[in-house]
Image (cartoon, rainbow, N blue to C red):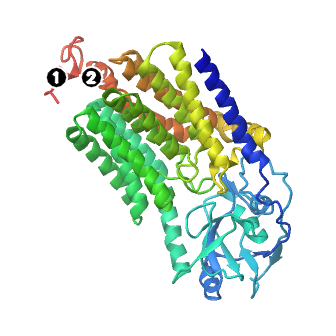
């Protein structure tokens, strides 16, 4: 009881420190009241003008006007003058205006100035990027943003930071032909984002096929899909159709070959850990590799780190690896995999997903409680320890000076956290009501998950499925993409369900299709075909 109370107190202290570290510090804009750059909105400016601006000595980039599905000049301007990337799903911001903006028909000939174009006055789909250039004060080449971590890609929130000269202002990178580099970047963005939905549905469809026909290959199939996604983002090039096709082929090959090559639980667990570690290493060494992957972030509100789809898909190999290695190597292995997953998904230089920290903590707490003991005391201790780890990560991140998605959730201390919670309504819960049809895959997740947990061969297997279900429930509460989370959650569950669909659902379907005379009620599918 004393240990539980001590951990609870530590969690409260960590939460207070995480909120206080951000709230107690000064705003990034404090002390920056003098505008160093003119900000000029040029009517009619297009990306076709970027080569001319680059030749005149400016640093150039592609500008994301705002977050959310729609954009307009009003949405973009509301965020620009306040130093934020305004999300069109939220009410209009009321923060202080930080910079002055001019309008002109032609770009200024000399700097220092930030020149950009805005979307149309009426609302349009937020699928385009707009030209931006910085003239003067040594800017030349390709613009670099600490908010996007993709060379050449600029967030609207960068404009005020650069105009006022804050620590996170835009930088410039030398480039032999910056306009050509931006053309290639735009092509990669279009290809990557055009393939996201198709890739997600394809991976789900293939995992359904593996769950029904060859469940042994499902865990390695999802691992291969994740590895292929990372490789495609690193290599780049190719159309959306080519990327989706390669992803599908790698998923099938990984499921068929991986199950034969990784026969021992130790080998399978180690291989799945390597997949998670590869994501961490890639995000640390080359963030654009994941930003421009088929299953990467959407590049409107999130530019780097893991998307909600990837967060959910990565949870499956992480949990399965922890369960397998814990059985062979002991509790330290489970704790180590949990720490790796938490850092990969939530650490500010890696996945930078604040909601993901809570998802991973809850899922691994359930897994640890189920793997180590059945007592309530151990369950409470595991949950408290996981929550403490997540809060300590938040605390360390709040003390960091680098901007990221996770720090934004801590902005303003308790008041900032309350604002983030209130924003869940338009960003997540209202979307659930709009996307009512998601109730069908959600019910499938619940039904398959509960059945798999109830029919599990051991307490550890039941805890594995339960941990994923808890992680998905937390994700739906704290994240703002109910559709992608539900689709990816069903795919992740099919990788862990342990053959339930093949040995129970498929025989029932075949009995109905073929008739009881061809397949007696007591027969199984395994008796009707050669042994795997």
The answer to which of 268 and 202 lies nearer the viewer is 268
Q: Residue at x 38, y 17 (%)?
A: 459
Q: Quadrant of the C terminus?
A: top left
| Residue 86, above or below 527 | below
State the image coordinates of residue 312 (x, y, percent, origin top left): 49, 39
Specify whether residue 420 is in view: no
Q: Quadrant of the N terminus?
A: top right
The answer to which of 68 and 17 lies nearer the viewer is 17
Q: Residue at x 54, y 47 (%)?
A: 307
Asked which secondary structure carries label 2, the reply is: helix
Rounded to the nearest whole Å, what is the CA distance between mark 2 and mark 1?
11 Å
530 vs 106, left or right, is left
Q: Residue at x 27, y 32 (%)?
A: 265
Residue position marked by numbered label 1 in the rendering: 528
7 vs 278, left or right, is right
How packed mark 2 is, by other alpha carbons closer than 10 Å (few <14, some 14-19, many 20 or more), is: some
Residue position marked by numbered label 2 in the rendering: 510
- Counting the numbered discs, the total is 2
Q: Residue at x 85, y 66 (%)?
A: 33
State the image coordinates of residue 523 (x, y, percent, origin top left): 20, 15
* CB contact under 8 Å: marks 2 and 1: yes
Asked which secondary structure carries label 1, the reply is: helix
State the image coordinates of residue 332 (x, y, percent, origin top left): 41, 32
Q: Quadrant of residue 216?
A: top left
State the image coordinates of residue 467 (x, y, percent, origin top left): 47, 27
Q: Residue 107's mark? A: none
120 vs 267, left or right, is right
- Comparing labels 2 and 1, the label whose residue is closer to the camera: 1
| Residue 253, above or below 97 | above
Q: Quadrant of residue 209?
A: top left
How packed mark 1 is, by other alpha carbons closer than 10 Å (few <14, some 14-19, many 20 or more), is: few
């Amino acid at each position: 009881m004393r240990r539980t109370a001590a951990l609870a107190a530590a969690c409260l202290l960590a939460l207070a420190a995480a909120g206080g570290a951000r709230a107690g510090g000064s705003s990034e804009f404090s002390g920056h009241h003098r505008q160093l750059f003119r900000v000029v909105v040029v009517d009619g400016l297009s990306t076709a003008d970027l080569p001319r601006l680059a030749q005149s000595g400016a640093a150039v980039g592609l500008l994301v006007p705002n977050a959310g599905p729609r954009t307009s000049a009003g949405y973009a301007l509301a965020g620009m003058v306040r130093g934020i990337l305004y999300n069109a799903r939220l009410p209009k911001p009321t923060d202080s205006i930080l910079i002055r903006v001019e309008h002109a028909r032609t770009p200024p000939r000399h700097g220092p100035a930030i020149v950009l174009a805005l979307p149309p006055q009426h609302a349009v789909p937020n699928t385009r990027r707009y030209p931006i250039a910085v003239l003067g004060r040594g800017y030349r080449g390709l613009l670099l943003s600490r908010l996007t971590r993709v060379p050449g890609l600029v967030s609207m929130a960068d404009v005020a930071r650069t105009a006022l000269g804050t620590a996170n202002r835009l930088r410039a990178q030398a480039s032999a032909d910056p306009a050509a580099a931006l053309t290639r970047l735009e092509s990669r963005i279009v290809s990557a984002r055009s393939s996201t939905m198709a890739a997600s549905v394809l991976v789900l469809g293939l995992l359904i096929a593996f769950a029904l026909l060859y469940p042994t290959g499902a865990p390695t199939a999802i691992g291969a899909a994740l590895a292929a996604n990372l490789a495609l983002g690193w290599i780049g090039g190719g159309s959306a159709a080519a990327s989706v096709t390669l992803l599908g082929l790698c998923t099938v090959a990984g499921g068929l070959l991986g199950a034969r090559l990784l026969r021992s639980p130790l080998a399978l667990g180690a291989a799945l850990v390597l997949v998670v570690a590869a994501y961490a290493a890639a995000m640390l060494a080359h963030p654009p590799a994941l930003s421009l992957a088929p299953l990467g972030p959407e590049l409107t509100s999130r530019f780097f780190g893991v998307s909600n789809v990837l967060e959910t898909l990565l949870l499956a190999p992480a949990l399965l690896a922890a369960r397998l290695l814990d059985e062979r190597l002991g509790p330290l292995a489970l704790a180590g995999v949990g720490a790796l997953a938490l850092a990969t998904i939530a650490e500010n230089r890696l996945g930078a997903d604040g909601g993901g920290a809570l998802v991973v903590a809850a899922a691994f707490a359930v897994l640890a409680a189920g793997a180590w003991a059945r007592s309530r005391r151990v369950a409470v201790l595991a949950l408290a320890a996981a929550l403490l780890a997540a809060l300590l990560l938040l605390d360390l991140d709040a003390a960091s000076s680098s901007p990221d998605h996770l720090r934004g959730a801590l902005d303003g201390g308790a008041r900032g956290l309350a604002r983030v919670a209130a924003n869940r309504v338009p960003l997540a819960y209202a979307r659930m009501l709009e996307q009512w049809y998601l109730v069908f895959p959600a019910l499938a997740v619940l039904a398959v998950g509960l059945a798999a947990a109830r029919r599990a061969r051991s307490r550890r297997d039941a805890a594995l499925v339960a941990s994923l279900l808890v992680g998905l429930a937390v994700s739906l509460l704290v994240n703002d993409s109910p559709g992608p989370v539900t689709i990816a959650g069903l795919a992740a569950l099919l990788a862990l369900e342990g053959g339930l669909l093949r040995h129970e659902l498929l025989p029932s379907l075949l009995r109905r299709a073929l008739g009881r005379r061809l397949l007696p009620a007591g027969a199984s599918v395994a008796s009707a075909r050669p042994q795997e």
